[in-house]
């Protein structure tokens, strides 16, 4: 993710959130604590980073062991704040460009690492807030594989969630 002031790029490497400036200097900004990872394998720290519109938090979605987690890294202190663990895959989490507490956290299919079982989803597009006061599908009547085939979601500049439906177009 390009820094808001274009001074460098934020990226994840293993359990770390890092920053590389234009001169090539790399520093660790934050880390997922070892006591959270425990003896589980960290498959992914983040699908892609997202910074809240007030610049306070980085949003990350990762997979450790047999769960997906949604968490925050404080932009200034590096504090790690776990929001929620899910027994299914959430990825591509992204902050709203107008509400610093709201984000989309799409649910995705996956093949279970242990059982090999294919795990599908009923709803792809979920909306959540950092205070954990809501977690709800964006379109509750929109069922994957039945009334839609959604993917590739993003926020418009005015704070509306846009997405592709492979069967019905772009919304």
Image (spheres, helix red, strand yellow):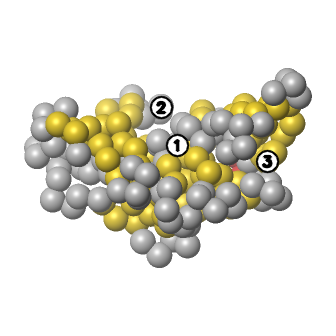
Q: Is 112 in front, or is 74? A: 74
Up/down of 79 relative to 92, above or below = below
Looking at the rendered image, the disc whose residue lies closer to the viewer, 1 or 3, is 3
User: Which badge, 2 or 3, comes first in the chain's sequence?
Assistant: 3
- Residue designated by label 3: 30
In the figure, residue 166 lies in which quadrant? Answer: top left
Q: Is 23 in front, or is 112? A: 23
User: Which badge, 1 or 2, comes first in the chain's sequence?
Assistant: 1
Tell me the distance, in whole angstroms, between the alpha carbons under discs 2 and 3. Answer: 27 Å
In this view of the protein, can residue 67 be seen by the observer? no
In the figure, residue 24 lies in which quadrant? Answer: top right
Q: Residue at x 73, y 58 (%)?
A: 74
Q: Is 139 in front, or is 55? A: 55
Up/down of 86 relative to 40, above or below = below
Looking at the rendered image, the disc whose residue lies closer to the viewer, 2 or 3, is 3
Q: Residues within 10 Å of mark 2 (few under 14, many from 20)?
A: few
- The quadrant of the image that shows the C terminus is top left
Q: Residue at x 67, y 45 (%)?
A: 4
Element at label 2: loop
Say the numbered circle drawn on residue 18: none
Q: Residue at x 60, y 42 (%)?
A: 49
User: Which badge, 1 or 3, comes first in the chain's sequence?
Assistant: 3
- Residue designated by label 1: 66
Tell me the distance, in whole angstroms, between the alpha carbons under discs 1 and 3. Answer: 23 Å
Element at label 1: loop
Where does the image place residue 85, in percent across and percent down from the top left?
53, 56
Q: Residues within 10 Å of mark 3 (few under 14, many from 20)?
A: many
Say the numbered circle drawn on residue 113: 2
């Amino acid at each position: 993710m390009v820094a808001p002031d274009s001074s460098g790029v934020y990226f994840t490497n293993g359990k770390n959130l890092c920053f590389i400036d234009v001169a090539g200097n790399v520093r660790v900004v934050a880390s997922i604590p070892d006591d959270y990872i425990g003896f589980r394998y960290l498959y992914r720290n983040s699908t892609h980073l997202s910074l809240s519109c007030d610049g306070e938090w980085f949003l990350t979605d990762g997979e450790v062991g047999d769960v997906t987690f949604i968490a925050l890294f404080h932009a200034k202190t590096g504090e790690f704040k776990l929001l929620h663990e899910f027994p299914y895959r959430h990825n591509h989490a992204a902050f709203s460009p107008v509400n610093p507490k709201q984000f989309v956290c799409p649910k995705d299919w996956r093949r279970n690492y242990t059982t090999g079982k294919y795990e599908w989803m009923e709803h792809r597009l979920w909306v959540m807030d950092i205070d954990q006061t809501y977690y709800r599908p964006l379109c509750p009547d929109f069922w994957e594989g039945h009334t839609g085939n959604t993917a590739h979601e993003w926020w418009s500049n005015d704070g509306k969630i846009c997405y592709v439906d492979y069967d019905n177009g772009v919304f």
